[in-house]
Image (tube, grey):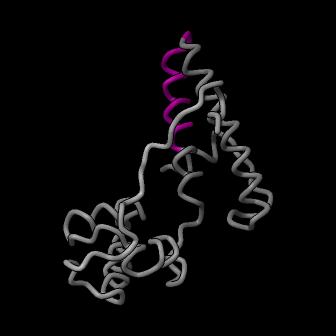
Amino acid sequence: MARMHSGARGKSGSTPPASKQSPDWVEYKPAEIEQVILDLANTGQTPSIIGMTLRDQYGIPSTKKLTGKTIEKILSEKGVEADFPRDLLNLISRSVTLKRHMDANKKDMTSKRGYILTVSKIRRLTKYYDSKGKIPKGWRYTPQQAELLVK
């Protein structure tokens, strides 16, 4: 599949692990893993940070293999969800940093193009999440709202 804003085609960056079974050396049970995930989420960590913490500190290579569910799925079942989807928030934070850079560097047209492309991705995702009911109905992207969301 081609990239969104260029003619290039790229390879996916990740390869799945060779085995589909959970490793034998992990000593945690699925209920314990879910409790650890819930505790880490209550401290304010994002699902990606939780996954890295589980890997590095607890020695859990794959939550999905051990529990059968992803970290996001576990959090949504427990009722601990963010107001906005993580990919949308990442794009919004990127647009805020690009906007600040453009305000400081008026003649940087490359960053202006990057900002325009990022905003178009945000608007496209907003339309999708609005139809799925994951964001408030009628929510629109503005730079002022983006500043408030990122802070």
Determine if the magenta segment contains residue 144: no
Quadrant of the rendering where the N terminus is positioned: top right
Residue farthest toward the top in the current orientation of the protein: 107
Q: Which residues are magenta?
A: 93-107
Q: Residue at x 50, y 84 (%)?
A: 78
In percent of width and height, residue 75 lies at: 48, 77
Q: Residue at x 64, y 25 (%)?
A: 6
In percent of width and height, residue 47 lies at: 42, 64
Q: Residue at x 30, y 88 (%)?
A: 29
Determine if the magenta segment contains residue 102: yes
Residue 29 horizontal side relative to residue 123, left or right: left
In percent of width and height, residue 94 lies at: 51, 38
Foreground of the two, 143 or 127: 127
Q: Residue at x 36, y 75 (%)?
A: 21
In percent of width and height, residue 20 lies at: 40, 71
Disc tally is: 0
Residue 54 horizontal side relative to residue 45, left or right: left
Q: Considering only vertical position in the picture, is 114 above or below 87?
A: above
Residue 110, quarter of picture: top right
Q: Considering only vertical position in the picture, is 13 above or below 132?
A: above
Foreground of the two, 48 or 130: 48
Q: Main secondary structure of the magenta part?
A: helix
Q: Considering only vertical position in the picture, is 63 above or below 103?
A: below
Residue 48, quarter of picture: bottom left
